[in-house]
Structure formats: structure tokens, C-alpha cells
Amino acid sequence: MPGIKRLLVVCTGNSCRSVMAKGLLKKLLESRKDVEIASAGTAAMPGFRPTQETIEIMARHGIDVSGHLSQRLTPDMVDRADLVLVMERGHQEEILKKIPRAKKKVFLLREYADTAPSSPTMDIEIPDPIAKPIEVYESCFRAIQEAIERVVKKL
């Protein structure tokens, strides 16, 4: 998708996965002043900080997300974005049910990045690590990192 200037990453609560993805995108694209990166959650409670585990994992990788505040996804956010990357099929379905005109720009992150798991028993979705051990957050981060690195190469 040439000409992508506004990226939107979406998860459920905008406190873990989309925060990780946004943080990685900002770090990898820091020299690209022409690209705007935002994140939101389909069921986010506005104004909440990322989970402590998310802050810790990102800090381990040199990215500070402690100032992030969650926001709920709106149709305007989707309309303004050139590309919307979601973590689960349910996010994609929810967006397209409410905003069918967005069909050509809403993708599962791993699908768009072409980092689908090699095993057919593994899922292309990136599961929510909320309320799970820190190791699950690290695994989530690695899956997001692999996909984001490939997305950046496409931009």
C-alpha cells in the first residue's frame, strides 16, 4: 500500500498489544516525520495507562510507553487512517461491521506483515496477554516485533 502516512494499530483495551505495536512503529520510523502513528482499543476505557507489564517489557527494549493513555476506537480514527492493523479477527470484524467502507485498509497485523505462523495449528492472531505472566507479555512483544519490522519494510 504505497502512500501510507497514517497508521492505526488496534487491540481491545489499548493497554498492551496496540501500545507495543505503536511504540515499536514510532521507534523504527522515528526518522520518518511524514508518518503519523496512533493506537486505540475497540473496548478501551479512555485515559488509562498501559499495564505495568507492558511498560516493563517495552522499557527492556528501550521504548518508553509510560505516558500513553488509552483511547476508544472511533469511526473518525479509522476514516483518517491509511492503514489499520488489528490483533484479532474479532477486531477486524467489529470495525468492518460498523465501517464497511474501510474494508481495503483493515488487516490483521500478522497477515499484513506476512508473518503468519508456519504451523497450521498456530493462529494468525496475537492473543491478549492481559492478566497473564510477564513471559506471555514477552512472547506477545516478540510476535508483534517480528510483524512490525516487516510492516516497516513495506512503507
Image (cartoon, rainbow, N blue to C red):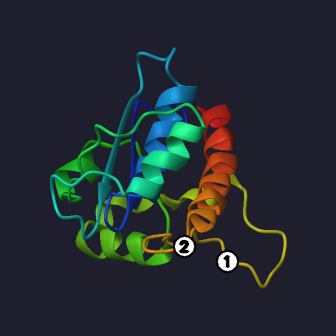
Q: Mark 1 sits on what residue? A: 123
Q: Does 65 appear above or below 45?
A: above
- Residue farthest right in this picture: 118
Q: Does 139 appear above or below 96?
A: above
Question: Which picture quadrant has residue 123?
Answer: bottom right
Q: Amino acid at mark 2?
A: Pro
**Residue drawn where x is 54% and y is 48% of the image:** 57
Q: Is residue 144 left or right of residue 56?
A: right
Element at label 2: loop
**Residue drawn where x is 46% and y is 58% of the image:** 17
Q: Can you give x and y, in whole percent of width and height, for residue 91 in the image?
A: 39, 71
Decide if residue 63 is in sight here: yes
What is the crowding at mark 1: few (fewer than 14 residues within 10 Å), some, or many (at least 20)? few
Q: Is residue 121 left or right of residue 92?
A: right
Q: Mark 2 sits on what residue? A: 127
**Residue drawn where x is 28% and y is 52% of the image:** 78
Decide if residue 84 is in sight here: no
**On residue 145, which mark appears?**
none
Q: Amino acid at mark 1?
A: Asp
What is the crowding at mark 2: few (fewer than 14 residues within 10 Å), some, or many (at least 20)? some
Residue sitting nearer the eye, 67 or 17: 67
Q: Can you give x and y, in whole percent of width and height, for residue 149 in the image?
A: 66, 39
How many dots with numbers? Answer: 2
Quadrant of the snapshot with the C terminus: top right
Question: Disc 2 to disc 1, how far (Cα)?
Answer: 9 Å
Of badges 2 and 1, nearer the viewer stands 2
